[in-house]
């Protein structure tokens, strides 16, 4: 979705009632962010809506991108928010072989998550401890927003909406996992809001 560099479209101020609705939607979608919501979306600050190509709305505070939403899809955090609050999101892990494909904008395929270096919720960790990786051991449903971490790397490299639930991924072990995500180095990552 954001593979190519682009320039931001019109920037408008969000009404306070819409701002409250966005804040409530963020808390509903990401309940673990609730203790930090005043740091992310302060009540007294002015939230801006920036129009991006392909009918994407970017919510920003000043020049800092916070969340984006494609039409009626779920509201998705920008990677800079994810890097600040990594524990607040459901997450998966890809193996080393999938990193270069993800960072070039390719669809994240299920084999990159189910191979030995990948991790899905409920997978056993290497030290033998039963998983809970990423979502407290609970399977993640299709259509939910997930953060993708890379094997051996500290920060998340991608965020997107699942095309297949993690339970189905474990059974099928093939097919697309996440399409049209936001990844490190893409157009949204490089976007200058000045």
Image (cartoon, rainbow, N blue to C red):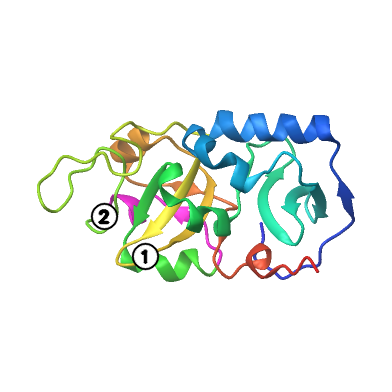
Bin the neighbour count of mark 2 within 10 Å (Cα to Cα): few under 14, some 14-19, many 20 and up. some
Q: Where is residue 192 in the image (x, y as percent from the top left)?
A: 75, 69
Label 1 sits on residue: 154
Bin the neighbour count of mark 1 within 10 Å (Cα to Cα): few under 14, some 14-19, many 20 and up. few
Residue at 29% in and 36% down = 171
Quarter of the rendering containing residue 117: bottom left
* Whether residue 173 is situated above or below residue 101 in the rendered picture: above
Residue at 35% in and 32% down = 139
Q: Give the range drawn in magenta.
A: 105-115
- Asked whether residue 144 is in view, the answer is no
Of helix, strand and loop, which one carries label 2?
loop
Q: Is residue 101 left or right of residue 7?
A: left
In the image, which disc is placed on residue 115?
A: 2
Q: Quadrant of the C terminus?
A: bottom right
- 157 in the magenta segment: no
Instruction: Name the one closer to the observer, 76 or 25.
Output: 25
């Amino acid at each position: 979705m954001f593979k190519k560099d682009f320039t931001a479209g019109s920037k408008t101020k969000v009404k306070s009632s819409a701002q409250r609705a966005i804040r409530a939607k963020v808390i509903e979608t990401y309940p673990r962010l609730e203790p930090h919501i005043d740091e992310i979306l302060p009540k007294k600050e002015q939230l801006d809506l920036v129009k991006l190509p392909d009918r994407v709305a970017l919510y920003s505070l000043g020049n800092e991108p916070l969340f984006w939403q494609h039409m009626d899809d779920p509201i998705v955090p920008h990677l800079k928010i994810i890097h600040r609050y990594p524990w607040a999101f459901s997450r998966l892990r890809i193996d080393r072989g999938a990193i270069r494909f993800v960072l070039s904008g390719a669809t994240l395929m299920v084999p990159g998550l189910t191979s030995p270096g990948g991790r899905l919720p409920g997978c056993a960790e290497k030290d033998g401890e039963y998983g809970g990786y990423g979502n407290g051991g609970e399977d993640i449903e299709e259509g939910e927003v997930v953060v993708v971490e890379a094997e051996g790397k500290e920060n998340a490299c991608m965020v997107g909406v699942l095309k297949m639930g993690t339970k189905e991924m474990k059974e099928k072990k093939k097919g697309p996992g996440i399409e049209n995500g936001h990844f490190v180095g893409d157009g949204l990552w490089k976007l200058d809001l000045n």
